[in-house]
Image (cartoon, helix red, strand yellow):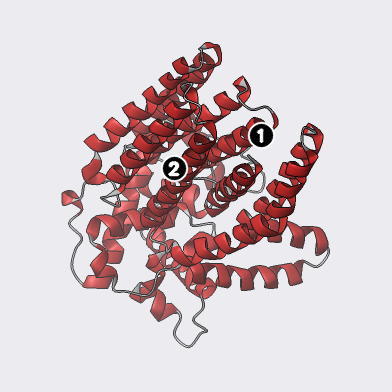
Amino acid sequence: MPAIAVPAFALTWWLSCYLIGRDPRRASLRWPACGLLSYALGVAVWTVAPGSEAAEILLCVPALCWAGAVVALLPLTPVERRPIDRGALTLGALFLLIIMFLPQVGRLVVLAPLVGALVLLWRMRAQVSPVSLPLALTSMAVLYTAGLALLLFPFGGEVPAIAAIGVDLLVFGYLMAVAHAAESGERLGPDVRRSLAGGLTAALLLGVPAGLTIWLAGDKDVVTVLQFVVVAAGATVAGLGDLVRRAMDRLALGDDSGLRADRSALFLNADALLRRREPRRLEALGEPEFLRLTRRALTDFGDLNRLARSPLTDLPLVGLRLAGREDQPRARAGALRAVLRECVSELRPAGPFGTTDDWRHYNVLQFCCVLGLNPYSRRVRVDGLSREARLVVDWFRRYVPEDVTKQWLREAAMVVAERLWTEMEGRQLPTRSIKTP
């Protein structure tokens, strides 16, 4: 068992950390990361207590996480998204509670939410990118079902079943990373290969000694658990390399903010080079994708790391602002931010500040994106804000539901995208013909 358990544990733990580190805010990455962590813990528990109920439950949980990830991929409007996300979370918790009290074979009921989520994905497949994603996810779900059935039925093939499930989940995690990269307009290959090299190094340097120690220790459960902890630590550093590096800089260079800022700028350029697509004509993206990238850039306005990876850094307007300056990802991100700020400023109606319908697009972009305020957060602080900002925060809280704010953001992003497209192509973006996902 250690010959399979240790590599399976190391690789799935690494991939879960990589998905979280890639973009912690994306539910479509958090769900598969949770599923991979559950599998890794299930493998560790199975190694300590083969055939135990806790191990079987942990190995069933990835099906629920898989269903949640598929739901996160559905192209829904903000009004549709909230009840469906809440329903998926509630249904997942209910099924988790159910399988705790079911017999071994009965735990296959955990596949029901996954089937339902895949059915919804197929119904909306025309709006899903990449187009082959529904077929790929369904194929892997079938293989996962076969592996889980082999594990739960008393056929005696538990170890091969665990290995097969691990392979399925690794492919599933990679597919979700592909979907995120396609949605974000980023490259995946160089970044995932670099992280995988670290994960394999950790698996070899730590996993091989850990596997030998587990094999030699025999029934000493404490030693076995400690070996998995060591492997998990190495895989975490490999998967969360960027986050770990920033934490170490804050810890070691806390009293030298200038040095930390310089290092942060250098690493930002290095990371962006891995994930930024090769320069290409943005007209080739198509109008719907251009609109989606504009909306994402506005949402990421306060994060130079994400802006540096946006294909919109290749806009002609960005190039004009960089004339005579060093052409680096961080500089392009700053220029893109300036272009977006200018577009938002042009949406401000003439006359004194207000909160009427004419001001909705400017207010939602200026205060929620440019200033990064979340009026619906309980932790939002208005100390030090301008009078206009305090007024808008109170106005959003009192009179504008959160779903309406998200819809206004989509509408305002369409206006900004139209302006950028016009500057780029010299013709108007036909926003009425675009169906936003």
Q: Secondary structure at mark 2?
A: helix
- Image position of 1 (left or right of 62): right
Any part of residue 347 in sight: no
Location of residue 305 in the rendering, given as x and y in whole percent from the top left corner? 54, 62
- Choose mark 1 or mark 2, whichever is in front: 1
**Residue type, numbered disc 2:** Asp
Any part of residue 415 in sight: yes
Determine whether 39 is above or below 288 in the image.
above
Determine whether 149 is above or below 14 in the image.
above
Foreground residue among 235 and 257: 235
Q: Which mark is residue 194?
A: none
Q: Which mark is residue 168?
A: 2
Q: Secondary structure at mark 1?
A: helix
Q: Which residue is mark 1?
A: 47
Per the model, the C-alpha gap separating discs 1 and 2 is 20 Å
Quadrant in which residue 46 is drawn: top right
**Residue type, numbered disc 1:** Thr
- Image position of 123 (left or right of 182): left
